[in-house]
Amino acid sequence: MASFIKRFEISPIQKVFFSFILLILTGAALLSLPASTRSGISFVDALFTSTSAVCVTGLTVVNTAESFTAFGQGIIAVLIQLGGLGIMTFSLSIFSLMGGSLSLKWRFTFENIYSDSKLNPIKGLLKRILVYTITIETAAALLLFLAFIPKHSAVEAARHAVFHSISAFCNAGFSTFQKGLVPYAGDLLVVITTAVTIMSGGLGFLVINELFRKLRHRSKKRLTLHTKMVLSMTAALIIGGTLYIAFLEWDSSFSSFSLKEKIISSFFQSVTCRTAGFNTVDISGLRQGTHCIMLLLMFIGGSPGSIAGGIKTTTLFVIIAMIAARFKGHSQVRIGTRAVSKDVIDRSTTLAILSFTYIFMATAFMLGMQNMDSSNSFLAVLFEVVSAFATVGLSMGVTEHLSGGGKMFICLTMLLGRLGPLTLIMALTSRARNIPVEYPEEQIMIG
């Protein structure tokens, strides 16, 4: 009997997957209720919205402000919060606060999600995750409330502020305003608060925890290599993206903006590409060169252990370090005074290659499915697929024109983008613990 039960026992990562599926279906059912919508939506649209919220993507087939009531928007906010933290992380946090203990199997799973969590007691880390989340979202909501109160009643301003703080920290990109944050493109308080909240959610809990402890205790202890990599790559991508977007759009899409609006719009689009999905300008009206750099930023995404999607900043850092080592003729891949293990290099390159392959195949499939003939259709569909896979939420206007099959395929892409890289890393990690049979090597020609 015990062997029979063990045969059908599902792994922790499978529990995470089924938890997401259950949450998506529950969310779709709730969003289909008459109380959730103003004039009713199809179940497919409700399922798409629920998937986008749980996977913290932000792509929408209906306007959130126009189609959903305050109750429906509240359901979306809850789905974003639960999906952002992850059903497993959220449940483990509650369990640890109640004094429960983690099984070895769950501990191993959690340590692979937060790869450096062995540096911190897991139960302590779980508690901090909830504390940091509540603290950051509350601070953002208060600042946004001050920005929204001049144009809304106190109740409405508070509702919009709480929703946007959750959406920003969870890198979701949903908005309760009809035109999103476009009307606030020149509002420094809204733009900076939203951008900082987005970056906080995309840095990763381990980085936030390390920075907080260093500031609080004024420790002279050096930052870990992981934190240094995350901070340096994040800064490089944001600054580089800002300068590139400003260079291309300064006298183009931003020509009618004031100097302040040009600077903060360039900065915000660079930040929001990192899986947030908010926009203060019309994305479809930007130049193709801007779309290309946005594609790259979306593909890279945020950092490990964060709410953000993409292949992650550290993955790119490792790949760049590996290429540099090959050119220099080094036998080891070095970052500073430390060497990167072969296992990490293999995982990074495999993740990047498989992600790129899926995006290429998904784009080809979508182009065939949607039968789009316009000259700009390839870029628009590619942008949509990358946005879905990297759980960003930006669009060039394709989402609302998707067929039923196209909507379901984008739903699948969002789910794969949210859980696929995690599942892949778990699979590679578990296999790495096995001792493989060694075969003799043989040289082949490449290039």
Image (cartoon, helix red, strand yellow):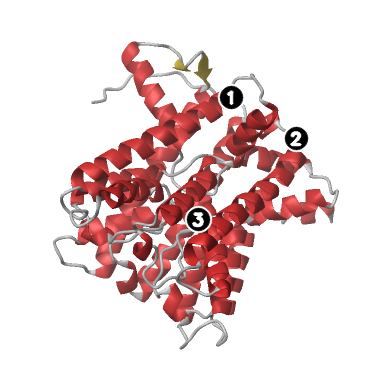
**Mark 1 or mark 3, which has the lower sequence index?**
3
Q: Identify the residue at image location x=83%, y=45%.
A: 101
Q: Identify which residue, 285 or 186, lies in the foreground.
A: 186
Residue 192 to residue 312: above or below:
below
Residue neighbourhood size for the residue with mark 1, other residues' Cα within 10 Å, grouped as few (<14), some (14–19), many (≥20) = few
In three-dimensional space, the C-alpha distance between marks 1 and 3, rounded to whole angstroms, equals 27 Å
- Taking 117 as reference, is 417 left or right? left
Q: Can residue 367 be seen in this view?
A: yes
- Taking 36 as reference, is 376 left or right? left
Local secondary structure at mark 2: loop
Residue 431 % position (x, y): 59, 35
Residue 198 % position (x, y): 48, 49
Residue 422 appears in which quarter of the rendering? Answer: top right
Residue 274 to residue 347: above or below:
below
Q: Identify the residue at image location x=57%, y=55%.
A: 84
Q: In which quarter of the image is the C terminus?
A: top left
Residue 435 appears in which quarter of the rendering? Answer: top right
Task: List the residue tagged with mark 3.
Answer: 168
Residue neighbourhood size for the residue with mark 2, other residues' Cα within 10 Å, grouped as few (<14), some (14–19), many (≥20) = few
- Taking 167 as reference, is 433 left or right? right
In three-dimensional space, the C-alpha distance between marks 3 and 2, rounded to whole angstroms, equals 28 Å
State the count of labels: 3
**Mark 1 or mark 2, which has the lower sequence index?**
2
Task: Check the image and name the residue furthest to the left.
Answer: 375
Amino acid carrying mark 3 in the image: Ala
Amino acid carrying mark 1 in the image: Thr
Task: List the residue tagged with mark 1.
Answer: 224
Task: List the residue tagged with mark 2.
Answer: 121
Local secondary structure at mark 1: loop
User: Do residues under tags 1 and 3 come within 8 Å of each other at their CB atoms?
Assistant: no
Residue 415 % position (x, y): 49, 58
